[in-house]
Image: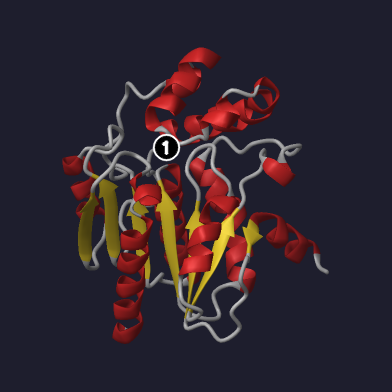
Amino acid sequence: MTAHRADGDLWIRRYHPAQDSEIRLLCLPHAGGSASFYLPVSQALPPRIEVLAVQYPGRQDRRLEPCVESIPELADQLLPLILEEWTDRPLALFGHSMGASLAFELAGLLEQRAGVVPVMLFASGRRAPSRFRVEDDVHGRGDEALLAEIKRLAGTDSRILGDDEVLRMVLPAIRSDYRAAELYRPERVHRVSCPVTALVGDADPKAPLDDVRAWREHTSGAFAMDVFPGGHFYLTEQAPRVIRRVTDALAGAAADR
């Protein structure tokens, strides 16, 4: 196994290999999230859509590795691994929250550096890249404030929040991810040419609808926006509807090629 392939296996998880898939969907987790968050997506999507899920450093089986504290650095590390093995068929990107910012950065770099245009970018639960807020500073607060924010968004199982030993393991990764998300500014990529579909919960405190609608400004391709009932993690509550929307959008994208 080559060094790059070994690196790729660390970064990119393929839960249900589909040798004859028509399209690949690369899924990028939220702050504090892991590749396993997308295991249900891999189980639910039809075999013609092969799901790949990214595992960031600093968590689960990569918990001993240093965290990456910048979206551009994450994109730079992922790009060659994607190009080496996963662009032999149409590629779509799905990112939730911080993952949406990373998906946008990756889509731009794929196009600029390799001429690879994703068939679709799904931006979930995230304001448009140009709609950052200077008051976003959760990463700089104390542990209690960070935990309060996590509980507010209901993104982490309450059983984990009550386990001090587990908390000590995951807090550094969560803080690092929040830093990457909150300090991201789209300096290298301002617009992509692939279609963008924005997905959001109607009660998401982190993604006001007007700020999500501004994703339209960041693509020269088609734009669509879907609003679901729910908060920041609407996609777990509305999983069947989200899966259906993604499936339909990718079917349309494949037909357009």
Q: Is residue 36 left or right of residue 115?
A: right
Q: Residue furthest front?
A: 159
Residue at the spot 49% in from the left edge and 38% down from the top edge:
31
Tag 1 secondary structure: loop
Percent x, y for residue 232?
34, 39
Q: Residue furthest left?
A: 210
Relative height, residue 250 to residue 105 (above, below): below
Relative height, residue 163 to residue 52 (above, below): above
Q: Is there any visible trace of residue 142 in the rendered image?
A: no
Q: Quadrant of the C terminus?
A: bottom left
> Which residue is the site of mark 1?
184
Q: Nearer the viewer, residue 200 or 179?
A: 200
Percent x, y for residue 151?
44, 26
Q: Nearer the viewer, residue 16 or 65?
A: 16
Residue at the spot 42% in from the left edge and 33% down from the top edge:
154
Percent x, y for residue 157?
52, 35
Q: Is there any visible trace of residue 30 in the rendered image?
A: yes
Residue at the spot 69% in from the left edge and 61% down from the top edge:
8
Amino acid type for the residue under numbered disc 1? Tyr
Q: Is residue 10 left or right of residue 123?
A: right
Rendered image quadrant of residue 172: top right
Residue at the spot 43% in from the left edge and 31% down from the top edge:
183
Q: Quadrant of the N terminus?
A: bottom right
Q: Nearer the viewer, residue 100 or 41?
A: 41
Q: Nearer the viewer, residue 228 or 86?
A: 228
